[in-house]
Image (cartoon, rainbow, N blue to C red):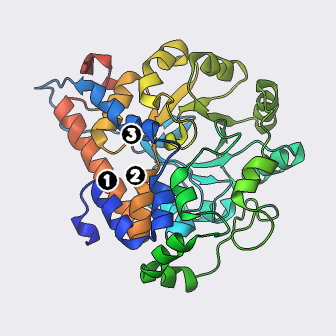
Amino acid sequence: MRLKDCHNFHDFRRMAEKRLPGPIFNYIDGAADDEVTLRRNTASFDSCDLVPNVLRGVTEVDMSVTVMGQKLAMPVYCSPTALQRLFHHQGERAVAAAAARYGTMFGVSSLGTVSLEEARRISNGPQVYQFYFHKDRGLNRDMMTRAKEAGVEVMMLTVDSITGGNRERDKRTGFAIPFKLNLAGMAQFAIKPSWAIDYLTHERFKLPQLDAHVSMGGGVMSISRYFTEMLDPSMTWDDVADMVRHWGGQFCLKGVMSVEDARRAVEIGCTGIVLSNHGGRQLDGSRSGFDQLAEIVDAVGDHIDVIMDGGVQRGTHVLKALSLGAKAVGVGRYYLFPLAAAGQAGVERALELMKTELERGMRLMGCTSVDQLTRENLRFR
């Protein structure tokens, strides 16, 4: 399968599955427990239909949006995700370069495999730093100081991961960082030599944001231990309010799903919230971001930028979210599969397809700008 033959999310997923060893593919593809929420994330978009308008003289289409003070050329951004160089040796470098080319925002994770500083050198576009709340408050402050010095515009605190989700696909293969594969998992690596060659012929993996604490290779601590030993499950709203004040800029909470929490985010001075269930990887059976979008926009949309992610595979999914009041939409697997399949070229093709679908969809909806998308354009079944 060739990259030019990939025309949608499912094509990229199949191409990635052919290239990646089973344990790594399933790490991207899988989710928690019975993966009900994973499936619901995409299915939720099918619960409503678009109602287009015609004869609106759509000669030019402006897809740009401003979210958390950042101007994006299109209303889709690359959500921060962990371990990207495990999927392809270019990792976050490819995503940063592709996001810069398409004028959109991207993020680096605390568990990213390229440093904040290097990503900043690659892209001068809006950069998010996604981080976790640690028991060591000094480490939290140090991470924010480093992000500010690197030129990061938006801090994004993940609040739905005070413990790891139950990802049974990983348990079946023995997938872990550092690798602790069982025999079935090792066999999967043996039959995918291209990944192994890629892995062995480039610099070894590291976690530059946390290299003193977590190791990709036989050192300090595994990622599972990082979640159970270093993150603070006693985190409260007061703790986050202190961080918001310390940062003094654009601050976003990722993983908010209730109206009550959205209101608290406004009260403590956050400038954005991401309605997210972590791609179905944390609490299985939880609602999708799209399902929660309308009631949260109604409650706080005039006071804070409401964003959503989860299950987005098409431009029409984005148009539905924007019509409900989302300021922008994050994608994860949508760019991770093409990254795994073809590096920067894959991510660029995925973003190009999304851009094309969005422009076509807006034309067919009779809209020349994103702010013309409203709930009048939707009907729920």
Image mark for residue 334: 2
> Total of numbered circles in the picture?
3
Instruction: Name the element at disc 2.
Output: helix
At label 1, counting other C-alpha atoms closer than 10 Å, the crowd grade (few under 14, some 14-19, many 20 or more) is some
Question: Which of pointers 1 and 2 lies earlier in the amino acid sequence?
Answer: 1
The residue at which mark 3 appears reads as 39
Given residues 30 and 270, the one toward you in this image is: 30
> Residue at the location (81% across, 61% down)?
213
Residue 75, percent from left and from top: 41, 39
**Tags 1 and 2 in contact by the CB under 8 Å rule?**
yes
Residue 146, percent from left and from top: 77, 54
Residue 26, percent from left and from top: 47, 59
**Tags 2 and 3 in contact by the CB under 8 Å rule?**
no
Given residues 22 and 288, the one toward you in this image is: 22
Residue 122, percent from left and from top: 56, 65
> Residue at the location (45% across, 42% down)?
35
The residue at which mark 1 appears reads as 9
Image mark for residue 254: none
Q: CA distance from mark 1 to mark 2?
A: 6 Å
The answer to whether one can see residue 65 in this image is: no
Q: Amino acid type of disc 1?
A: Phe
Q: Amino acid type of disc 2?
A: Tyr
At label 2, counting other C-alpha atoms closer than 10 Å, the crowd grade (few under 14, some 14-19, many 20 or more) is many
Instruction: Name the element at disc 3.
Output: helix
Q: On the rendered image, what quadrant is the N terminus found in?
A: bottom left
Relative height, residue 293 to residue 132 (above, below): above
Instruction: State the image quarter where residue 236 is shown.
Output: top right
> Residue at the location (63% across, 65% down)?
113
Q: Amino acid type of disc 3?
A: Arg
